[in-house]
Each structure stands twice: as C-alpha cells, then as structure tokens.
Image: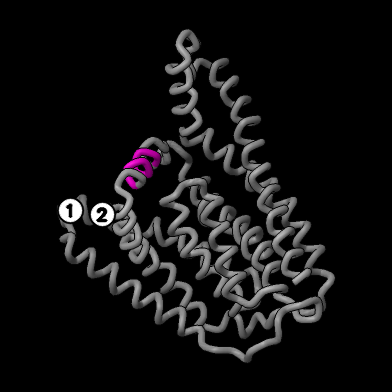
Amino acid sequence: MKEKWKAIGWTCLYMVIAFAIVFTISFGLGFVIVMIGLRIGVIQIDAMQKYDSFANEVLQYLQGGTPMMVLSFIQELIMFVGFGLWYYFREKKYAYRPDYKKAFQPKNIISMAGIAFFGQYAVNLLLLLVFMLLPGVFADYQDLIQNLDIDAANPILMIFSVVVFGPLVEELLFRGMIFGKLRRAFSFWPSGIISAVLFGVFHLNLVQGIYAAVFGLVLAYIFEKTETLWGCYLLHALFNMSSYIITGYESALEKVGFEVPVGIQLLISVVSIAVVGVLIKFFGKRADRRPINVNNNLA
C-alpha cells in the first residue's frame, strides 16, 4: 500500500510541474508577446480604452498562428528538457531494456498504422455522442476550434509541433513518467486509466479531454505491449499525421463536388471502431510478468 500511495504522490507532482510550466509560460511569455504586439501595432492601443475590447484583441492575437506556435513550442521544449533528463536518469538505474526487434515487428507497425488511421474515424463517432449528450459543451468546443487561427501558422512548424515534437513530449510525460511510475505499483488497468484520465485533463477542454483520455488508454496499452516509450510515440505521431492526410483528401473531394452521405460517414465510423479493436488485439498476448518493480521495469 505504501508503494501505491508513493506512486500516486509522484504522479501528482509530475502533473503539478507540468501545469506550472504551461501556465507560467502562457501568462509570462503571453505578456511579452502582447507587449510586442502593442509595440508593432498588431494590437491596437486604442483598445485599451475599453477593457472588453482590449481583452478580445489580446485573445485574438494570442490565438493567431505564430504566437500560438511560439507559446506551444517553448512549453514543450521546457517539459522535454526537464522531464527528459528526469526520465533518463530514473530509467538508467534499472537493468531492464526492451526487445526492440520484438516490439517493432512488422505486424505491430501495421497495427499501429491502422489504429492511427481508422482511429480518426472512430473519434468522429465519439464526437457525435458528445454532441448528442452535451450539445452546449460541444458548441463551445466548436467555437474554440474556429477561433484558433491554425491556418495562419507556418505549415512546416505546425507539422513539426503536432506530429514530431508534441507527441514526443506528451508520451514522455504521460506514458514514460506517469504510467511508468504507476505501473510499478499497480496492475495495468488502474495505471492505464489514471494516466489516460490525466492525459485528457491536461488538454484543458472537456471534448478534447474525452477523446484524448480514450486514446491515452490505447497508448498505455501499446506502451505495455512494446515495453518501450518509442512504441506509443510512434502510434501517437502516426495518429496525428493521419489527421492531416484525411483532412487533405477530404478537402480534395469537396473541391470536385463529392460529398459523402451522413449515413455512410456514420457507418465508416462504426466499422472503424471494430477495426481498431481488432488491430489492438492483433498485438497478441505476451508472457505474463510479475508486477513491475525495481528489478522488472518498463523502459
């Protein structure tokens, strides 16, 4: 019991540090960006005559492509350096290392690619359920997405952040640090569920948090199966990349006037959930291990 409470305590500490970094950078660097915006005239000084107008000007500016990317990248960079060094020295104490050849065998790579692609359509069904059960919350989520000026960001920087660097930082924190610590004291399901819920909470948005939590549980499962951080990172990167691929060809279809009927879209989402379930199972069973401890470690 002592080990379990200790693991929970460490988990809380990791989350506090992560949120402290996010909020400190958001407010601190956000203030600097706003001052620069005022200086160069992007934010109108006249707006300061009225607080509401000024607040809207600031919010719109910070939600623009470049400022948002700067904030996001600096937050991720600080967490990557801090948690990366912490994770490296923590794991270096243990002798266990994963069998990379077994972890990244062809069937696992194919499974992860399939989970990533069909998982995007499975998320659509989850979003539909949220829309039906929580229409007000979903409307707020749509407003948030529309207000974020993603198109204004440099596409190369956006892809780097969303596909390459962002997933690495999130996997380092939530699967490497949090799930890894919990897994030494708990069985898979408590460890996976706790880390997945915290992954959802970290997104600070209920709708995103719901599907992030579901995806977080899948990522924890992949981490458990591949026994390495690189397994869940690969899936996370493929999942994010597939969203760009799907958006690209859907936009191309719209330009030629082709629109998929709603019924077909719903069917595709339902089938995708089944496909994702089969692919997750496709990883197969491995030999059961004793509860993870200092002599039996996930790296």
Looking at the rendering, in which quadrant would you find the C terminus? bottom right
Residue 160 in sight here: no
| Range shown magenta | 138-144
Residue 288, compared with residue 113, is above or below; it is below
Q: At 73% across and 58% down in the image, what residue appears?
A: 9
- Horizontal and vertical percent position of residue 36: 59, 21
Q: How is the image coloured?
A: one colour
Q: At 44% across and 28% down in the image, what residue appears?
A: 60
Residue 87 on the magenta segment:
no
- Horizontal and vertical percent position of residue 116: 44, 68
The residue indicated by pointer 2 is 252
Q: At 39% across and 67% down in the image, what residue appears?
A: 119
Mark 1 near mark 2, Cβ–Cβ under 8 Å? yes
Q: Which mark is residue 256?
A: 1
The residue lying toward the viewer, choosing from 286 and 161, is: 286
Q: Is residue 113 left or right of residue 226?
A: left
